[in-house]
Amino acid sequence: MPPKGSKKAAPKKAEAAAAAAPAEADKPAASPKAAKRTKAESGADAKDTTKKADTPVRRQSTGGATVTEEMAYAGTTAFERCTKDGDFDAKSMLRIVSWNVAGLRGFLSRGGDLSKFCATEKPDILCLQETKLSDPADGPKIGAIDGYSHVDSISTAKKGYAGTRTYVRDGLVKVTPVHAFGFNLDKPDDHDDEGRVVTTALPDLGDLTIVNTYVPNSGMTLERLDFRENDFDPMMRRFLKSIPWKDSVVWTGDLNVAERDYDRFWGGNFKQMQKCPGFTPEERASFRTTLKECNMVDAFRHKYPTAAKAGTYTFFSARFNQRAKGNGWRLDYFVVSAALAARVVDCFPLTSYADSDHQPLVLWLKRK
């Protein structure tokens, strides 16, 4: 800690806080499709009064309030898992894992081994984000896992950017899973040209529907905040509400938001922290709007409402060696339909994996 009288301490902390914020490499310029969406969608909304709730989230103000570190962490508790690994029962539970791999090729070149990971952790479903594949032909060859099938959603806006992938364990279901891409279950959708959403419906499991999502990072200068708040997030809400099996939805992935004051490490002062992507008032308010309008629950906070700091973070910036310092963010989520909340057995990060700047997040869910 710097001495209290130091005038330079706060700016240095603020710089470190910004540098340690989540970033998305090589962001594309807004595509023509993205630029046209607002007009097209507002026209559709004018004809459909059921979509009025999806108007852009109003920008929030701190109202001049000062939040201190003591205030942010007041009432929080140390994280302690409510289960042990041996408590998992494969006959009565599902194990679902979400992991931002920060580029699948890079992940594998850094020593990441998905086959070994699956042999150890035994996920029934594995959702990856930021796969950064360039060509659909690469999908079957890169990162294939024996005993699992997978589907990719690949960015067409820019090669080697964003992207999502979902694996399903062979034998998990008898009826072939149904996959959809983007924001439409019934037909091809061109609103998601960055490969950020892939949905998997599992009829054998009570129509359980897994929505694997890589939410756009707003950028270090918040250059994509408007797109995220007024374009992507409203489309995400409309899509989640359009799924017929509303009581069986699991929305997961790198959602790029630290919803609570204690969902990220304390860096500098609160005013500066709110300028970091993933922690702006607009992003946090928009995420809360999604939870409310879609009647969904943050599974981790459902089990651990006051847990903070060590054991709760899912992202550590490689800059300034933040993992070693324990300075992380909780950016990855399992968000479930409110009706599924009672079936959540546990939700927790796997802290022993360092092949990405994100850690895997696990959901144990009771079978129907």
Image (cartoon, rainbow, N blue to C red):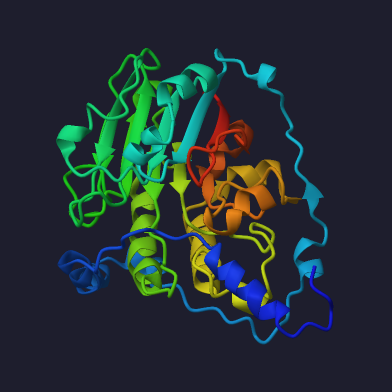
**Quarter of image, res 227:** bottom left
Q: Which residue is drawn at 47% across and 53% down?
A: 255
Please give the count of numbered marks on the rendered protein. Answer: 0
Q: Can the viewer see residue 329 in this picture?
A: no
Task: Say whether residue 303 is left or right of residue 20.
Answer: right
* Lateral position of residue 156 relative to residue 284, left or right: left
Is residue 99 shown to the viewer in this render?
yes
Identify the residue at image location x=49%, y=32%: 97
Residue 155, given in percent of the width and then of the height, sits at 23, 50
Query: In the image shown, does 278 or 177 lie closer to the viewer?
Result: 278
Q: Please give left or right for residue 148 compared with residue 287 in the image.
A: left
The location of residue 301, given as percent across then percent down, is 65, 47
- Is 281 above or below relative to 76? below
The image position of residue 124, as x and y in percent, is 45, 22
- Relative horizontal placement of residue 33, taking residue 360 as reference (left or right): left
Camera-nearest residue between 48 and 34: 34
Q: Report the front residue among 57 and 275.
A: 275
The answer to whether 349 is drawn above or below residue 184 in the figure is above
Which quadrant would the N terminus be assigned to in this image? Answer: bottom right
Residue 236 in the image: above or below residue 130: below
Whole-percent x, y for residue 354 in the image: 54, 38
